[in-house]
Image (cartoon, rainbow, N blue to C red):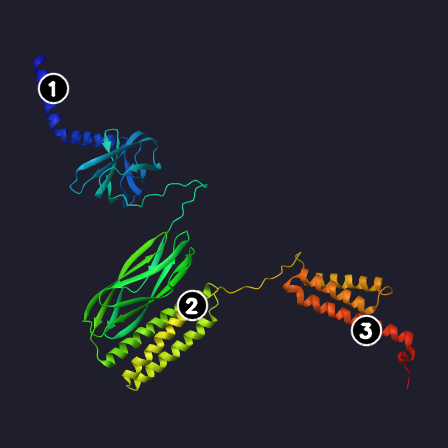
Amino acid sequence: MDKKFIALLIILAIIFLEVYYKIFSTIITGLVSIALSIAPEIGISLEFLDMPTSIVYNSYSVIRVGLHNYGSLDVNESTLRLETRTHNNLTIYIVDEQVYNLSIGERRTVTVSWYASPEPGSYKMYVYSIFDNETSNVIYSNFTILPIPVTPPRVPRIPPYEVIKILNISVIYPPRLNLTQDAEYIVLIKVINTGDLDVHNLSLKLESTGILTEVILPEMQSVLKPGSSIIFTASLKVPKELKPGNYTIDWLVYSDEINKTGKIIGEVRILDIKEKAEELLLYYTDLLDLIEEEIDAAEKEEKNVTIVRELFKDASKELEVAKELFRLTLYSSCIEHLEVVRIKIVEVVRALIYAEPIKKPILLPAFPMMPCLVWAIMLILINSIVSVFLKRKLHWAKIVLIMIGVSLLIALLAGMNCMFRVILSALVMIIIFIFYVLVERLKRERPYLLRFRRW
């Protein structure tokens, strides 16, 4: 009886399980999903806040990364990893930065001082965070490591009691000239003292095979001060029988302290008489333009270029005459007249070389510095005192002379700015004093002249 009852219970249990299996499985699945949904979540997101696109090799650069804890738990410790990879995804450089105590919802900026040790080239920077055996999202950026720029060597520091003075000159000259047979040309070579020391006994020497050279002026410059310049004038004569081609004209600027060398290439061509006249006209026109620039520069240096400008006008007029002869197709006469222009240009350059600095007038400064009105009042007071105290002791003419002397002295002390006003005040006061003396004399000697009658 007991065995049958137990068997019945087992059969009923099996039937119950078959009926309610699906119900129980649904309930258990729901409970598991609910348990998983309320389980805590850990998560960190990253973004670049500052990532340079180029970094110089072997230098430090700042990289800023923003971290955000979007999970439901605090992150007590995490590692921010910066991986430098090649374009073949090969990791060559890793930098780790520890981050502590990142609260729920907190945003934090992590600044990494990154040293560019990889060789110059193009790379990718991968950044991610490692925490609790998990990894955040991965961000990356392309960047370039630049080679170290080549900089000139630094000049060693010089103590204040040691001064290094440089000796140097610069030479300005035409590197190439177009020449023609049976013609003479004027060439200007300018030497500038660009150093800190005087250059003594400066001269120019020209040498050429085929072309005749001559230094016209100056033969020698005794001293060339720092910042100053000198223009050497030379003559180039091209013989009639010289063959066409390029000829080298070697120049040498030499002095007691320094020498400079160079060369001018002269291209000799065969031209007919019209082309020759036109070529010479263009040459001397350009030469006069260059000389005019030098005259303007000398004027800015406060040199007296009055005579230089007059000679320059004469040379320009002669050049205009030559141009008019060319327009009249008198080419031979034009070439002959250009010889006059050449001579005039030499005169202009000679006057420019020896132009003297403008002598400035010596101005007496106002001493002490006071307004002109104060000086005028001072003059009036002093002259009034002189006239009152000396009126009965000296003749009026002597008093006038004393007043003139006092006025001149005060005018000199007042300076050029106030001198005219002070002298004018003195003249007015002296005239008033003389008028006063005359009135006093008329009162004593001819009082009737001062009586007025009523009509």
Secondary structure beneath label 1: helix
Q: Mark 1 packing: few (<14 Cα in 10 Å), some, or many (20+)?
A: few
Q: Please say if the residues under marks 3 and 2 sit with CB atoms less than 8 Å apart.
A: no
Spatial CA distance of label 3 from label 2 is: 58 Å
- Tag 2: residue type? Leu
> Residue at (12%, 22%) from the top-left corner?
13
Residue 87 position in % (x across, y down)? 17, 43
Q: Which mark is residue 220?
A: none
Asked whether 122 or 76 is in front, the reply is: 122
Q: Report which residue position mark 3 lands on.
A: 435
Q: Report which residue position mark 2 lands on.
A: 352
Residue 372 position in % (x across, y down)? 68, 63
Q: Which mark is residue 9?
A: 1
Task: Note whether 108 is above or below 239 in the view shown.
Answer: above
State the quadrant of the N terminus.
top left
Spatial CA distance of label 1 from label 2 is: 138 Å
Q: Residue furthest top?
A: 2
Query: Can residue 373 be seen here?
Result: no
Residue 290 position in % (x across, y down)? 36, 69
Secondary structure beneath label 3: helix
Viewer-side label of 3, 1 = 3
Secondary structure beneath label 2: helix
